[in-house]
Image: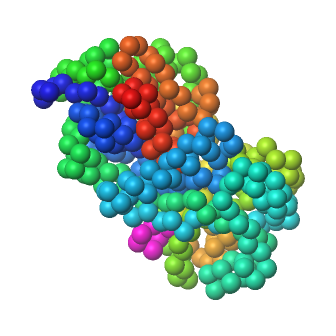
C-alpha cells in the first residue's frame, strides 16, 4: 500500500466514521479517515453519550443497540474509555407516566426481553438516599451505558491511530467522491471502497443520492451544569417525557394520556420538542438537554426560554439547584427514509447516515454490519 492508497477510505470522524474504521482495522484492512475539522466537532461530541438499549423501537434499532452494547464494552476496554454501566433511570413524575411504565414492563418489556426493572415504594425511596423519592416510579434500564463523548471520541481516534494503524487526515475536506478515489484538499487518494459518514452535511458530497433520501436536520439546545447540593450520580437519567419520543414506548396506548397532559399543562414542551435527559460526566458535572427543532437548516439562535424550561425540569427531577457552566447547540440528521440509511451511491461508494438522534446507541453495530457486507 502506498501513502495514498488504502483498502478503505472513510469520510468523517464522528462515531459512524470511527465505528467503520474500527470494524475494518480489526479485520486487518488498511484504513484512511478524512475529517474536515482538526478534531471531531459534530453531533458525536455534542451529545449525551447515552448508549441506550431500553428506549429503542422493536425491530432493527433494538437489534443494533443490543449488538452495539457488547461492542462498546470491547471498545471501551481496548481504548481505555470511561464507560458507565450502571444503566439508566427513567423517572415517572405523573400518574400517566407511571401507568405507561407499568404497562410496558408487563407487556412489551417482557415479550421482547428489554432488560429493565420497575422501582417503586422502598426501592425508589432508597435510591440515592431518598433523593428521588418525590417521583412515582423509576424504570431502571439495565443494559444502558454512557460515555463522556467529548473525551471518548478523541480517545478512540488515538487508539485507532496508535494501536490499529488507521491513518487520519484532520483539517482535510473531501471535495468529491468517485468509484475508487476521493479528491481532498490534500490531493487525490485511492481505495477499493469509500464509506461516507458525513453526518448532516447533505451537500458537499453525493448531493444527488442524499437529496433523494429527503433528509432534514434537528437542532437541540444543551447545557453542562453542576448541582449546588452534591449528588454522585452514576446513572443516565430520563423522565416520562421520553415516553412520547422513544420508539419503545411512544406507540403504546398509554402514551396518549401523557401527550394529552403535556398539551393541557405545558404545551411548550411539545412545541419545543423538550424531553429531559441528564448524563453525569466523569468530573462530577451533568450534561442536560434537550429540545428538538426540525427543518432543512439549523437556526443559529438558541432560545433562552427553552434553556430555562430544561433547567427547571432538571432541577425538579434531581431535587436540587443547578449552576450552568456551558451552553451549546447540537445538530443531527433526521427524517430520512428510516432511523438510518445505507446508500450504495456508486460501485465501491457507500453513504451511511443516521436519521434519528440515536447514533451513539447503534453506531458501533452499524459500522460492523456495513464493513462485514463490504469486506466479509
Ligand atoms: C445534542 C445531541 C444529543 C444526542 N444524544 C445522543 C445520545 O445520548 N445517544 C445517542 O445514541 N445519540 C445521541 N445523539 C445522536 C448522535 O450523536 C448522532 O446520531 C451521531 O453522533 C451521528 O454520528 P455521525 O458520525 O453520523 O455524525 P457526526 O458526529 O456529525 O460526524 C460527521 C463528521 O463528518 C465530517 N464531514 C462531513 N462532511 C465532510 C467532508 N466532505 N469532508 C471531511 N469531513 C466531513 C464532519 O466534520 C463531522 O465531524 C445526539 C445528538 C445530538 C446533536
Compared across the picture, whether 204 is left or right of 273 comes to left
Measured from the top left, where is residue 255 in percent x and y? 82, 50
- Near-viewer residue (205 or 137): 137
Q: Is residue 95 magenta?
A: no
Name the quadrant containing residue 183: top left
Measured from the top left, where is residue 112 in percent x and y? 72, 49
Q: Is residue 108 visible?
A: yes
- Near-viewer residue (150 or 266): 150
Farthest residue in the left direction? 2
Q: Is residue 175 visible?
A: no
Q: Which region shows up in magenta?
A: 280-287
For residue 285, above or below residue 128: above
Compared across the picture, whether 231 is left or right of 75 comes to right
Query: Residue shown at 74%/59% (left/top)?
Result: 240
Query: Residue shown at 48%/53% (left/top)?
Result: 70
Measured from the top left, where is residue 65 in percent x and y? 56, 47
Measured from the top left, where is residue 19 in percent x and y? 39, 42
Name the quadrant containing residue 357: top right
Q: Quadrant of the C terminus?
A: top left
Query: Residue shown at 71%/66% (left/top)?
Result: 117
Amino acid at each position: 500500500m502506498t501513502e495514498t492508497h488504502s483498502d478503505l477510505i472513510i469520510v468523517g470522524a464522528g462515531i459512524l466514521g470511527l465505528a467503520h474504521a474500527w470494524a475494518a482495522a480489526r479485520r486487518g484492512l488498511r484504513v484512511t479517515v478524512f475529517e474536515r475539522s482538526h478534531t471531531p466537532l459534530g453531533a458525536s461530541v455534542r451529545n449525551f453519550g447515552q448508549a441506550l438499549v431500553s428506549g429503542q423501537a422493536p425491530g432493527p434499532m433494538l437489534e443494533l443497540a443490543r449488538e452495539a452494547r457488547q461492542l462498546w464494552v470491547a471498545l471501551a476496554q481496548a481504548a481505555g474509555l470511561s464507560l458507565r454501566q450502571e444503566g439508566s433511570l427513567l423517572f415517572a413524575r405523573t400518574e400517566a407516566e407511571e401507568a405507561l411504565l407499568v404497562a410496558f414492563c408487563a407487556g412489551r418489556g417482557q415479550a421482547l426481553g428489554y432488560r429493565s426493572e420497575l422501582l417503586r415504594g422502598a426501592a425508589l425511596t432508597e435510591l440515592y438516599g431518598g433523593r428521588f423519592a418525590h417521583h412515582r416510579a423509576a424504570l431502571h434500564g439495565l443494559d444502558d451505558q454512557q460515555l463522556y463523548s467529548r473525551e471518548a471520541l478523541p480517545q478512540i481516534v488515538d487508539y485507532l491511530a496508535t494501536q490499529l494503524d488507521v491513518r487520519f487526515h484532520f483539517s482535510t475536506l473531501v471535495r468529491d467522491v468517485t468509484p475508487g478515489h476521493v479528491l481532498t484538499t490534500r490531493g487525490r487518494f485511492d481505495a477499493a471502497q469509500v464509506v461516507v459518514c458525513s453526518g448532516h452535511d447533505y451537500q458537499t458530497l453525493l448531493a444527488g443520492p442524499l437529496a433523494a433520501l429527503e433528509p432534514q436536520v434537528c437542532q437541540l439546545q444543551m447545557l453542562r451544569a453542576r448541582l449546588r447540593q452534591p449528588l454522585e450520580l452514576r446513572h443516565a437519567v430520563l423522565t416520562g417525557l421520553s415516553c412520547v419520543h422513544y420508539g419503545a414506548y411512544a406507540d403504546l396506548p398509554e402514551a396518549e394520556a401523557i401527550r394529552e397532559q403535556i398539551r393541557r399543562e405545558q404545551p411548550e414542551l411539545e412545541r419545543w420538542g423538550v424531553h429531559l435527559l441528564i448524563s453525569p460526566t466523569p468530573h462530577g458535572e451533568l450534561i442536560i438537554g434537550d429540545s428538538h427543532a426540525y427543518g432543512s437548516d439549523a437556526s443559529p439562535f438558541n432560545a433562552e426560554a427553552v434553556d430555562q424550561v430544561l433547567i427547571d425540569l432538571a432541577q425538579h427531577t434531581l431535587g436540587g439547584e443547578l449552576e450552568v457552566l456551558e451552553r451549546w447547540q447540537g445538530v443531527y440528521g433526521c427524517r430520512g427514509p428510516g432511523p438510518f440509511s445505507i446508500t450504495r451511491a456508486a460501485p465501491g461508494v457507500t453513504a451511511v447516515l443516521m436519521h434519528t438522534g440515536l447514533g451513539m446507541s447503534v453506531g458501533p453495530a452499524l459500522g460492523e454490519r456495513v464493513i462485514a457486507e463490504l469486506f466479509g
